[in-house]
Amino acid sequence: MMKYNLSEFQASYGLSSQLPESDRPEFVFSGRSNVGKSSLINRLCNRKNLARVSSTPGKTATINFYRVDGCYFVDLPGYGYAKVSNAERDRWDELINSYFEEDRAVSVLVQLLDSRHAPSADDHQMLAYLRYHNIPFVAALTKCDKLKKAEQEAQMLAFSACLAPYGCRKIFMTSADKGQGMDELRAYLDECLAEAGGNDAL
């Protein structure tokens, strides 16, 4: 099992040439701007300020690496923020493409989606990208504490139908504020780590 409390920020990388060597299992987190990636990573690792939470959508234009036990948590820059310039969007595309084209040791990608709303056009574009590149992924539906129990169940059914064509492996209803779904998500990441051979190579 991963020791989630053994976590620390490594660095932010704005250029593909800066990315560190892929020498350990990597768990990737993807989602649109302001969907709650930093909050989710903090809650998973039981840390308040491991990942810096920005109140400005679209501000994170780097890939952030965190060392968690013997693994990397990789936080991709948020997408879909309308005020980002074309040049910045192009840099985002180049950075993401370079990351996945490097044949890195990705165990699984966690795609974050707001549980309260149907996936946006940008979300669908990212989901199509994951399917096209055969990137194994699960979905974390965020901010579920804003929904009543019956609404959560209805949204889970709706997302299951929506995500199935993209090859989503599993869906987690999560709340970084209340902690809902975190134990289940940690258990799943531990399973993926075991399949990857754990930390034996380190």
Image (tube, rainbow, N blue to C red):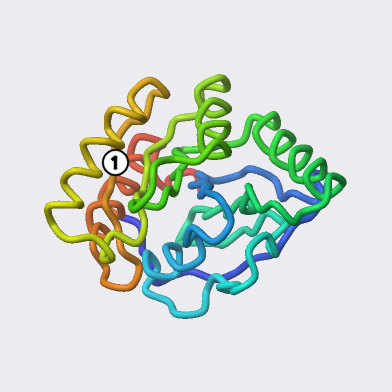
Residue at point 52% right, 45% down? 26
157 above or below 23? above
23 above or below 135? below
In this view, which residue lies farthest toward the left?
Answer: 150
Number of marks present in the image shown: 1
199 above or below 145? above
Relative to the observer, which residue lies in front, 11 or 138?
A: 138
Using residue 196 as the reference point, say whether residue 101 is left or right of it: right
Residue at point 33% right, 73% down? 177
In this view, which residue lies farthest toward the right?
Answer: 87
Quarter where residue 44 is shown? bottom left
Residue at point 53% right, 47% down? 30
Relative to the observer, which residue lies in front, 36 or 81?
A: 81
Q: Quadrant of the N terminus?
A: bottom left
Q: Where is residue 16 shown, x and y percent of the image? A: 79, 44
In this view, which residue lies farthest toward the bottom?
Answer: 48
Using residue 10 as the reference point, say whether residue 16 is left or right of it: right
Amino acid type of disc 1?
Answer: Ile
Residue density around tag 1, few if under 14, some if 14–19, many if 20 or more, within 10 Å: many
Relative to the observer, which residue lies in front, 124 or 133?
A: 124
Q: Where is residue 185 shown, x and y percent of the image? A: 29, 52
Q: Where is residue 178 shown, x and y percent of the image? A: 26, 72
Residue at the disc numbered 1: 171
186 above or below 3? above
Quarter where residue 122 is shown? top right
Disc 1 on helix, strand or loop? strand
Q: Where is residue 66 shown, x and y percent of the image? A: 57, 62
